[in-house]
């Protein structure tokens, strides 16, 4: 039955279908608008959080600078050394935050190079661990890389390295002195799962809900007073989305945390996820 006949003999039926289509489009647009409002609000909150996190160490630097300028002649060498150490800590904090923020923004606007390659997970994790040898020695932490030496995934190697660095950094930050960190891997039918386990402070039930959210400020001080912005896990989440992966965790306050990362173990799975 053509459209002319429907319009002539069944006008109400035609209008009913048109109204249904219109209602569906309106419903879709309303949902899109709601999501945009929520996303905009989340980003505004996130920007205010980042601004606060950047402002705090700068205020500390300015305060020490003023103190040194006004009282340098009255301070002994040990006092000056302590102030310089504090300045270095503040500078490191600012640099780390700005670096993660730049990486995160590049991912969001699709300006980070993306090249899929076959990555050996054991070797990639070893590379990330080596970068933190000094931090591991200072806190006397033993780290065991139990990832299967023949475990591979398909992902962007630079992004994978960034993910592993952030997970290892967090594990060290929240581990007590003279403790251990473990990494391992599990193979499933369609993916390879890598985990990083620490025996540190863990996360409370209240704070669990704040992880991976732009509109929640979740930042904890490390066991050696290390600072952080909480941006590292957000960055990991975005990088994993780009690589058809996922991140989740298990934790218990006072007993430590395990963070899991799943990545495609074949090009077919990667293609299926990204289509």
Image (cartoon, grey):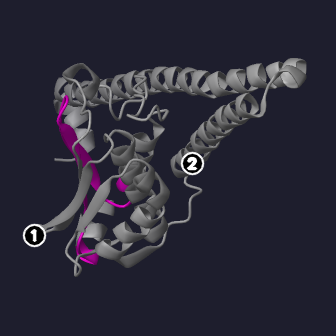
Q: Is residue 144 above or below residue 96?
A: below
Q: Residue 125: where, in percent of width, then height? A: 35, 67
Residue count near mark 2 (Cα–Cα under 10 Å), binned few <14, some 14–19, many ≥20: few
Say whether residue 227 is left or right of residue 146. right
Tell me, yes or no, if residue 99 can be seen here: yes
Magenta region, residue range:
240-268
The residue singled out by tag 1 in the image is 189
Residue count near mark 1 (Cα–Cα under 10 Å), binned few <14, some 14–19, many ≥20: few
The residue singled out by tag 2 in the image is 109
Tell me, yes or no, if residue 260 can be seen here: no
The picture quadrant where one finds residue 205 is: top left
Q: Tag 1, which secondary structure?
A: loop
Given residues 55 and 74, the one toward you in this image is: 74
The picture quadrant where one finds residue 154 is: bottom left
Residue at the spot x=36%, y=61% of the render? Answer: 243
Residue at the spot x=24%, y=19% of the render? Answer: 206
Q: Is residue 120 above or below residue 95?
A: below
Where's the C terminus, which quadrant?
bottom left
Q: Earlier in the sequence, mark 1 or mark 2?
A: 2
- Magenta stretch: residue 243 in it? yes
Q: Residue 130: where, in percent of width, then height? A: 44, 66
């Amino acid at each position: 039955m053509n459209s002319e006949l429907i319009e002539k003999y069944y006008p109400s039926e035609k209008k009913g279908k048109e109204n249904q289509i219109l209602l569906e489009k309106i419903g879709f647009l309303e949902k899109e608008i709601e999501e945009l409002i929520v996303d905009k609000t989340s980003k505004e909150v996130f920007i205010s959080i980042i601004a606060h996190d950047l402002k705090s160490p700068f205020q500390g630097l300015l305060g020490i600078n003023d103190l040194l300028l006004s009282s340098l002649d009255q301070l002994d060498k040990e006092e000056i050394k302590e102030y310089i150490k504090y300045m270095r800590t503040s500078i490191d904090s600012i640099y780390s935050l700005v670096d993660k923020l730049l990486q995160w923004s590049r991912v969001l606007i699709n300006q980070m190079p993306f090249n899929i390659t076959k990555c050996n997970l054991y070797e990639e994790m070893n590379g990330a661990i080596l970068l933190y040898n000094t931090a591991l020695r200072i806190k006397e932490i033993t780290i065991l890389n139990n990832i299967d030496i023949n475990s591979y995934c398909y992902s962007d190697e630079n992004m994978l390295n960034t993910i592993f660095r952030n997970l290892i950094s967090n594990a060290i930050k929240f581990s007590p002195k003279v403790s251990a960190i473990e990494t391992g891997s599990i193979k499933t039918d369609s993916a390879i799962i890598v985990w990083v386990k620490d025996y540190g402070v863990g996360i409370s039930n209240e704070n669990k809900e704040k992880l991976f959210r732009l509109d929640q400020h979740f930042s904890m001080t490390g066991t050696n007073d290390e600072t952080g912005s909480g941006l590292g896990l957000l960055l990991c989440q975005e990088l994993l989305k780009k690589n058809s992966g996922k991140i989740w965790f298990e934790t218990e306050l006072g007993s430590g945390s395990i963070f899991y990362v799943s990545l495609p173990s074949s090009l077919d799975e990667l293609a299926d996820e990204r289509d």
